[in-house]
Image (cartoon, rainbow, N blue to C red):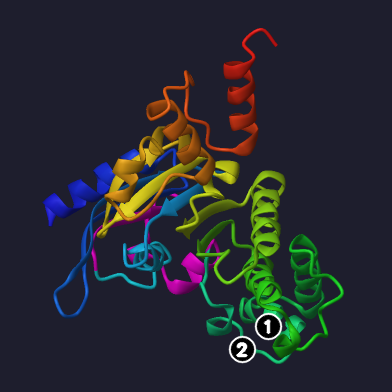
């Protein structure tokens, strides 16, 4: 018991300046299969973090552990200095909320207002406060005017926004999102990512997003962790993580398309690029610098 307490104190010490400290030595499914192992994540308040991995890499399981839905793991999740294993679901959900990949798995009420209001009502807020929280949350996700709308009449992207609003109405300061752009068209993807960036930068919401959309990652994320076969294989800024297509393909991912093009121009066509850009804007500047060095 002393060893366990000492270990937990060490973990808490590492986490004292962090909003969320995740250390998972292992998590096994009931059949004994190891789903997660050797994972350490350090997430500061106000960061926008990505968990990048192919299908089956363990992203959803990791988010469920971080949200307290799965507690039978070896390790510690420290939320604001406290191990979530010692917190009640209500105490966790006051701060952390998970948005599922499929919004139909999360939405259940008849109307938008009823669904977004469900959390605040169950938290014991007075009616006036519930109404205020719902209206503010819908405004944050650009769904004001939809309060009386039937959930069944919403588009897929609108349903995802309502899921986020439901968590914001409860006062969640940390959002965990499982493939938030999945099922959306290209314009819907960028609208969703711009919404998340707005919540992060203007409202200070800490966001951890699981995704396999490598082309969106460099535009929005502060830091990135790559998950493969249940463990973290690389972490850092997008420029730190995206290095070479061969390394990415070994974990069933690829570079952003613009980065892959410049990488081939540099290594196969011997064009003298100084760095591998990850966005169109960066690529444009690198190309101009290379082909018109005096411009």
Badge count? 2
> Distance from label 2 to label 1 (Cα)?
7 Å
Within the image, what quadrant is residue 85 found in? bottom left
Q: Which residue is the extreme one toward the front?
A: 269
Above/below status of 30 relative to 243: below
Q: Quadrant of the C terminus?
A: top right
Q: Is residue 22 visible?
A: no
Q: Secondary structure under badge 2? A: loop
Q: Residue at x 36, y 47 (%)?
A: 41
| 262 versus 71 height, above or below | above
Q: Position of residue 106 (x, y in %)?
A: 56, 81
Position in image of residue 145 (x %, y %): 87, 74
Mark 1 element type: helix
- Could you say which quadrant of the image residue 73 lies in? bottom left
Q: Is residue 150 left or right of residue 85?
A: right
Residue denoted by label 2? 108
Q: Look at mark 1 in the image and give the residue it sits on.
A: 115
């Amino acid at each position: 018991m002393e060893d366990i307490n000492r270990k937990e104190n060490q973990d808490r010490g590492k986490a004292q300046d962090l909003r969320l400290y995740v250390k998972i030595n292992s998590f096994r499914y009931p059949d004994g299969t190891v789903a997660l192992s050797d994972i350490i994540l350090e997430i500061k308040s106000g960061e926008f973090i990505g968990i990048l991995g192919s299908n089956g890499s363990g992203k959803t399981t990791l988010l469920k552990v971080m949200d307290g839905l799965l507690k039978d793991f070896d390790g510690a999740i420290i939320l604001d200095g406290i191990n979530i294993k010692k917190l009640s679901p209500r105490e966790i959900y006051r701060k952390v909320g998970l948005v599922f990949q499929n919004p139909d798995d999360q939405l259940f009420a008849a109307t938008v207002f009823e669904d977004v209001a469900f959390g605040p009502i169950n938290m014991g807020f007075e009616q006036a406060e519930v109404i205020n929280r719902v209206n503010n949350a819908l405004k944050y996700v650009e769904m004001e005017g939809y309060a009386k709308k039937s959930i069944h009449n919403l588009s897929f992207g609108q349903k995802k926004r309502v899921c986020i609003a439901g968590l914001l109405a409860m006062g969640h300061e940390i959002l965990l999102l499982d493939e938030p752009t999945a099922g959306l068209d290209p314009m819907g993807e960028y609208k969703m990512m711009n919404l998340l960036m707005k919540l992060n930068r203007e409202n200070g919401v800490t966001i951890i997003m699981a995704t396999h959309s490598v082309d969106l990652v460099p535009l929005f994320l502060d830091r990135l962790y790559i998950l493969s076969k249940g463990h973290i294989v690389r972490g850092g800024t997008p420029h730190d993580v995206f290095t070479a297509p061969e390394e990415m393909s070994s974990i069933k991912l690829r570079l952003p398309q613009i980065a892959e093009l410049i990488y081939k121009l540099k290594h196969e066509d011997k064009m003298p690029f100084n760095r591998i850009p990850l966005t169109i804007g960066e690529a444009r500047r690198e190309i101009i610098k290379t082909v018109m060095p005096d411009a």
